Image (cartoon, coloured by chain):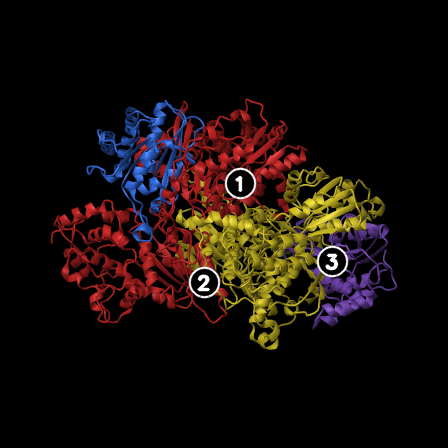
Chain colours: A yellow, B purple, C red, D blue
């Protein structure tokens, strides 16, 4: 990682070609443009951009690096993951007003969160350049909607650039910084997943060190009061007619395949241009069509489009992913200029406003548009592919083996009968949202960032006057809690909602790559905010922190919190497996052995009412586990050993007897996801040992749960099982 | 050098697909071939599907469509199979039998396809197919990707000579792992040199 | 107020005509449609709608009313001012998902705050009807921008209605509830100031009591995960093609002045239609033109517009306030249908995309469009109006007399020299934003809701590495603090910003009409959140609460907070003069007399270094007052009496001597706004008296500061002065 | 009854402009005349300008433009003067000399206009003008609005007869204040009955 950081910080006095991801190109371009500060909230497909600056910041702040690499650590770039996109944009605006150039990075839905800041600053002024990067996600690879951020250009009246390739993105970021400084407006560069996550060749150059000198000017524009607003709106619109804007519109309206006079014209923007270029050249039809690529999409490049429209084409095709924004603008301008050429867009040859483009889709569209059959140049597909594609098992994402959220969900499964109870579980955005999928299915709602706590209180309120005054449960990750959950929680306390909030506190922003947040700051330059005192200060009367792997204690606390009338909060706190503190534990690689005495002390043997779990009970596993947990005649929570309440005694003996099937059944009796059990098990029933030839119980579980006859897995485990058994020596 | 050639790498998050693609990109850069790459790795850390399409040549993107992939490197057999509609009759494929079972298979709700049978099918359909049924025990599973790259380099339509690929590895991989990586590559290159599968 | 509440709750079995404000009509229509719950954040021009429901809720919750008015208190409507628009919309969505019909009300910029909730729920589903009312403010009467909320229809793909009159608004709210329930999408009704704040005749009818029975259904649509999103987008777009939508488009596309075949056609929407109707009929030209009014603007009423366009007009004029949204849609549809009629819109006859329409503007536009001179029907203007209009003093809004914010600003003026210091004061939205105007001029920035704390930390960060590591000050109202300031403060604590936050805590949301908020909840059904423990829980190390009228103590605390390195917060806590607790004090109407001994004990006399303020010192008032405050030789803060540090002794004697000019000078020596001084004075130097014939010092100040020779006021005060002096008996 | 007639009420926040407009609306409703009202009161509680335009008749809005107001009721003289471009030569005006000084005047940065001179000007320009230089001492300043309404009712172009306006007050005002309000109205109606100003 340090090498990548050095690479991105290294200036090149002569052009240096490199193949980088769009997001990396964006980061480099910002550096070359002389960015002073970057403010972001992580979110796919934007995250790599901000991650680079996070590394740059760490690198440049390190005194060792400052000494070793004085050139690339001078004028360090400030970086911050703000707690949400609104604050990130607000701080970026303020930073710019303080005369330091800024960039603000977020994903599509982030712009919604930040929009209030955008919609007013345009009526005012900025100082140093301010560039906003918004990454859209047509096709919803990793987003809760596929909204089209191009609307913000029109809605906020800000210049907007829409690159088609990493090289475009690289150039446009630099243009955006320059333009922003000239017209004192934020400039938006909007990418899509296929631009941000594509690698292409980009030419690195020098890095601008004409950094802004901090300065705040008292200007009337900084005071936004209604009396001045209407005039400010007119001034804003004038800025968009500025010659620098017109120049950029011209520069970014590019003709491609323009050598021949053609009957067909295409106007396209964004990644659509990339598809067209490849397909037309691959099928040798570049002479049949002229293509105009629009890289700057707001203000609308009227002059350039009119001049293209007037070239007397028979038909013009508009290609853009998502909404018909470009198409409607072109039609409007054609109508205004009384140009009667046939214009085709959405609705033509399967072009719709949902989903993303693909080579196949655009190939079909171009064949229809050009009335040309590409089949002569096409490759021949394989035979009988359906047979090999039908019924292939899907591979949905799942919570990692060992993820503490699995333990918390198991706990919730024990505490809440999904069949018998109408209790509603309101989920939120983040890794733990995977709990909505099978096999967990422990979430009833997932919406957008921070909705869980609002959803719970709204659902509580909707049933408030009815007979069922049941508590509603909100489940929220720690990152999301700080992003927007806290505000909803304030509202819940204020309106006396009867809800339980479970914070899945895995000490990081997990989903997007383990960024810090106020509750888990990691770096000393940040102040870590402890959640329980914050909640108590806010007036939450019941706050419980649990270790989700400690099932018996956690179960008790969860039940207490459920019974509490009012707002109660349970913080299930255990590190994400990707964090160093989790990895540290694993790295100890301690050899361990089973202590037979302690093994026999688990709840299974202490609960006189329920027989040993070696008796196979396929149906009522959860209710039996639950009964055991609440049973009076059992050892205390602190003494309890197997978090999943598995009879390790029986399990262990079965393996010694060679009865692996029984062993697996014992695990599955208590744990729906037997294989995972081996991964999340933290081996409480083992003792450390110095003997090298002892296999830990965790490994035993892993090996047994991987046996082929139980799981029909014909690959490696068989051999591994053999090898493992060899090593067991007791 | 060839123009307009598409390589696809398919597998599961954590198998080093992006890493492998970086080596191929470096090989292209060293050869002076325009290159672009399209990766899809939404929730890879959560064990999802990862693919990386590499386009070689001017106007050639990393995006791939029906019958648009010339060379497929499959790091996981199920994910290799999922890609067959992108292959054409002149495609080459190298893939290994290192299975990572999705939840549905583990929970006995779905069946893992018959990999050997699939390998035979593919062998009949495509120009050249190499199937690694058992990876040599001396290779760490994290280096199966480079092993397959080595095996691929030996195939007749692979667009880079072994010297170029080796230089690419040398340039991309730094420090401690370089030697191990080059060794895995060599092992792949020489794997069952005298025995052509399928 | 109770009568208005009863009126709005009373059902009418036969049509009942009444003249009401648009906002009142909206509230009534929601009741008639059977709304179960209303969630809002106040903001002009939307506030009256939510205020009505606030009263309805209070009325219906009162057991006395429940007994007295059983009919109109049954099935009470839930109401809540959520802490911001995002949470209001989220709770409304949740309420709807709980099968209770909901309405969410906000002003234009509020939709920015709420937008993230809107942009995803459309991909999912609601339960009972959900109507969102957004009130735009063309002309910026009371907003920080004049953004056009009509974009949300396109951007979020939700049906949108755009009424022209209160009667329209009334009907459309009912249509919106019905449609929302049918297609399971939120429906937006967008008004403007001129619709919301206009009164017109509306016909009240019956009230729907088919209230929703609380119910939550576990549906896959409630789980928003990427895998399902793309398909959900397509389903959303299908909903907009539903027959119920098409029916409403037809119903709300109305022909006006359609009797004659005309050469001129007008398509208009919103209040534009109202202007046209009046001007055309007033000038007797209705036969010259056909008008199509579009009440439903998303999805675009394609069929209706095409049929209008095909009527073979010579020219068509598009009239809409703000952006050319309708115009571009009409041009697009004309282009698609190859209709070549001349279409005029923005750019024609002074039509621009900023500001609001007016009778005069539209009169000119229509004269140009119809090529007709209206002057024959016009009235004759008065002569010489310029002479009487030039140089008329403006009347900008100002902080109320007695407003505690004045005291806080005075304090800041004492503590911070605006000339000598570069200290930046970042303001926020709310009453105290008036402090940016003369004579206070104590704010450097005002942007949008909650920006102050972000601005301060961003500006601090921009200068962080420079030599001036000065603290930056954020000023924020208590309502705004809870709306969005808290999140920014979390970020400031997290990133270790060096800022001072002054919370202008006047115990209410002042600007919009004194709504409750979590920090000042007033009603027992709400839990009041005390700010200091919340801040301490959050990790703010220095939190001080001051009474801004207690200048000496407050000054000390403020200086300490300024010196503190890190985040410090000063809460200037004193009630808004409109709150009952302030009024209660006034209502006591205690008669008071001056105690000569105590009068002489003010700081002026104790500070040996500074001569008595009877010596007129026009220049250095503030610095002298400040010197006095920090002087060692003065009586303690607790003993200090006149908060503005005015020599009441000298003042008093001047009046007795009849030297009113001197008396005024003494006041003005310490208080820039002498007249206000009399209003905000809380009479600390007076003693209570039972004598009826004693005039309080406050009244003295008021009378003296109102004397004509000092202020050139020729009206009443002269007489009042005379009368007042008569009453002085000492 | 007349058709299409526009009344404008102008003053400062707190002077009861909306209240007065409500009475006129009620009078219109009682007369069966279509009525609509446009109020501008952005920051009225902070002492800003408030106006209320009332349109009587079909298609008549409360919005007003140049020379578009037929009857002006001015509760504050400066605000009355600010409205003169909306008047025409056949307009009627009633206004009182109860001044509320803006900050700029108090701070001696601007001068309050000469009200008496303005009243003379207006008298010459418009059909009928009534100027109340001194309100009778027996009237509470909060009822100046109703007093002016009374005076207006006596003017020849005012669209409502006094019986209608009285019924409107009776219907709009409830409880304790009704009597006081009706008395203020009566006082306005009878004010200097034998002495026509200007």
The answer to whether A174 is drawn above or below residue C358 in the figure is: below
**Chain letter of disc 2?**
C
| Residue that appears at 44% across and 37% down | C194
Q: Residue at x 68, y 65 (%)?
A: A204
The CA span between labels 2 and 3 is: 43 Å
Question: Which residue occupies the extreme right position in the image?
Answer: B194
- Residue closest to the eye, C124 or C276: C276
Label located before the other in sequence (1 or 2): 1
Q: Nearer the viewer, residue A68 or A522?
A: A68
C312 in relation to A673, above or below: above
How packed mark 2 is, by other alpha carbons closer than 10 Å (few <14, some 14-19, many 20 or more), is: many
Q: Are marks 2 and 3 in contact (CB under 8 Å)?
A: no
Residue situated in front as seen by the camera: C504 or D168? D168
Q: Quadrant of the N terminus of chain C?
A: top left
Q: Are marks 2 and 3 on the same chain?
A: no
The chain holding disc 3 is B
> x%, y% of residue B104?
67, 49
Q: Tell how many labels.
A: 3
Q: Which residue is mark 1?
A: C350
Badge 3: residue crowd in 10 Å (few <14, some 14–19, many ≥20): many
CA–CA distance in space, label 1 to label 2 = 50 Å
Label 3 to label 1: alpha-carbon separation: 51 Å
Q: Secondary structure at mark 1?
A: loop
Q: Callout 3: helix, strand or loop?
A: strand
Tell me the crowding category of disc 1: few under 14, some 14 to 19, or many 20 or more residues within 10 angstroms, Cα based: few
Q: Nearer the viewer, mark 2 or mark 3?
A: 3
Q: Which residue ends up furthest to the bottom in the rendered image?
A: A67
Residue where numbered disc 3 is placed:
B36
- Picture disc at residue D112: none
Check the image and report above or below for B175 versus C17.
below
Mark 1, chain letter? C
Which residue is denoted by mark 2 in the rendering? C493
């Amino acid at each position: 990682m340090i090498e990548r950081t050095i690479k991105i910080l290294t200036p090149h006095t002569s052009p240096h070609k490199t193949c980088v991801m769009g997001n990396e190109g964006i980061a480099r371009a910002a550096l070359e443009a002389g960015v002073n500060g970057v403010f972001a909230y992580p979110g796919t497909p934007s995250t790599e951009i901000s991650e680079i600056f996070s590394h740059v910041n760490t690198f440049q702040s390190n005194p060792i690096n400052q000494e070793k690499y004085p050139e690339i650590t001078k004028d360090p770039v400030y970086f911050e993951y703000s707690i949400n996109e609104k604050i990130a944009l607000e701080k970026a605006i303020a930073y710019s007003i303080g005369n330091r150039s800024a960039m603000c990075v977020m994903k599509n839905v982030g712009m919604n969160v930040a929009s209030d800041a955008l919609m007013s600053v345009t009526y005012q002024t900025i100082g140093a350049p301010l560039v906003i990067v918004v990454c859209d996600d047509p096709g919803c690879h990793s987003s809760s909607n596929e909204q089209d951020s191009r609307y913000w250009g029109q809605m906020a009246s800000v210049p907007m650039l829409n690159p088609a390739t990493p090289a475009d993105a690289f150039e446009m970021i630099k243009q955006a910084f320059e333009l922003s400084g000239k017209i004192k407006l934020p400039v938006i560069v909007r990418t899509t997943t296929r631009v941000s996550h594509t690698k292409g060749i980009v030419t690195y150059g020098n890095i601008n060190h004409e950094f802004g000198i901090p300065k705040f000017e008292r200007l009337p524009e900084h005071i936004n009061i209604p009396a001045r607003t209407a005039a400010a709106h007119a001034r804003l619109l004038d800025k968009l007619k500025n010659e620098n804007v017109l120049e950029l519109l011209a520069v970014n309206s590019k003709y491609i395949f323009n050598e021949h006079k053609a009957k067909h014209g295409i106007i396209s923007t964004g990644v659509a241009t990339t598809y067209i270029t490849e397909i037309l050249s691959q099928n040798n039809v570049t002479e049949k069509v002229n293509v105009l690529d629009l890289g700057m999409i707001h203000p609308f490049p009227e002059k350039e489009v009119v001049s293209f429209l007037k070239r007397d084409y028979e038909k013009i095709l508009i290609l853009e992913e998502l909404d018909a924004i470009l198409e409607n603008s072109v039609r409007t301008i054609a109508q205004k200029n009384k140009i009667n050429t046939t214009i085709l867009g959405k609705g033509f040859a399967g072009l719709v406003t949902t989903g993303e483009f693909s080579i196949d889709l655009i190939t079909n569209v171009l064949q229809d548009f050009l009335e040309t059959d590409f089949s002569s140049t096409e490759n021949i597909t394989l035979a009988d592919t359906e047979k090999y594609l039908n019924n292939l098992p899907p591979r949905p994402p799942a919570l990692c083996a060992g993820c503490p959220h699995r333990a918390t969900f198991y706990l919730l499964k024990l505490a809440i009968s999904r069949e018998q109870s109408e209790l509603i579980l309101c989920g939120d955005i983040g890794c733990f949202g995977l709990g909505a999928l099978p096999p967990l299915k422990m979430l009833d709602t997932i919406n957008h960032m921070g909705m869980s706590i609002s959803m719970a209180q709204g659902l509580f309120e909707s049933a408030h006057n009815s007979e069922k005054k049941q508590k509603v449960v909100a489940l929220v990750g720690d990152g999301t809690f700080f992003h927007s959950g806290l505000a909803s929680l304030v509202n819940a306390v204020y309106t006396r909602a009867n809800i339980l909030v479970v914070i899945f506190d895995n000490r990081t922003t997990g989903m997007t790559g383990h960024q810090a947040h106020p509750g888990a700051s990691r770096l000393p330059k940040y102040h870590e905010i402890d959640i329980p005192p914050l909640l108590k200060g806010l007036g939450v009367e019941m706050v419980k922190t649990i270790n989700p792997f400690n099932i018996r204690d956690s179960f008790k606390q969860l039940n207490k919190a459920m019974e509490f009338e009012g707002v109660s909060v349970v913080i299930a706190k255990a590190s994400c497996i990707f964090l160093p503190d989790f990895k540290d534990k694993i790295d100890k690689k301690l050899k361990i052995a089973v202590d037979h005495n302690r093994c026999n002390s688990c709840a299974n043997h202490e609960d006189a009412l329920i027989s040993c779990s070696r008796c196979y009970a396929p149906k009522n596993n959860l209710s039996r586990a639950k009964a055991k947990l609440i049973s009076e005649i059992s050892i205390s929570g602190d003494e309890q050993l197997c978090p999943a309440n598995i009879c390790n005694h029986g399990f262990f003996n079965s393996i010694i007897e060679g009865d692996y099937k029984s062993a697996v059944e014992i695990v599955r009796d208590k744990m729906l996801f037997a294989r995972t059990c081996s991964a999340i098990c933290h081996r409480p029933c083992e003792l450390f040992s110095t003997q090298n030839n002892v296999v830990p119980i965790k490994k035993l579980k892993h090996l047994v749960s991987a046996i082929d006859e139980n799981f029909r897995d014909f690959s490696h485990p068989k051999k591994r099982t053999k090898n493992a058994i060899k090593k067991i020596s007791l | 050098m060839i123009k307009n050639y598409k390589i696809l790498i398919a597998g599961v998050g954590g198998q080093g697909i992006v890493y492998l693609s970086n080596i191929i990109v470096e090989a292209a850069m060293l050869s002076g071939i325009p290159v672009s790459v399209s990766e899809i790795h939404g929730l890879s850390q959560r064990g999802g599907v990862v693919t990386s399409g590499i386009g070689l040549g001017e106007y050639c993107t990393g995006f791939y469509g029906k019958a648009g992939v010339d060379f497929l490197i499959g790091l996981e057999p199920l994910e290799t199979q999922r890609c067959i509609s992108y292959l054409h009759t002149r495609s080459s494929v190298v893939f290994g039998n290192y299975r990572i079972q999705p939840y549905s298979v583990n929970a006995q709700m779905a069946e893992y396809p018959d990999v050997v049978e699939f390998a035979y099918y593919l062998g009949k359909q495509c120009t050249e197919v190499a199937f690694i049924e058992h990876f040599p025990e001396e290779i760490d599973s994290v280096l199966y990707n480079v092993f397959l790259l080595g095996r691929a380099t030996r195939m007749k339509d692979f667009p880079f000579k072994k010297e170029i690929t080796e230089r690419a590895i040398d340039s991309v991989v730094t420090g401690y792992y370089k030697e191990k990586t080059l060794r895995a590559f060599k092992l792949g290159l020489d794997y069952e040199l005298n025995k052509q599968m399928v």
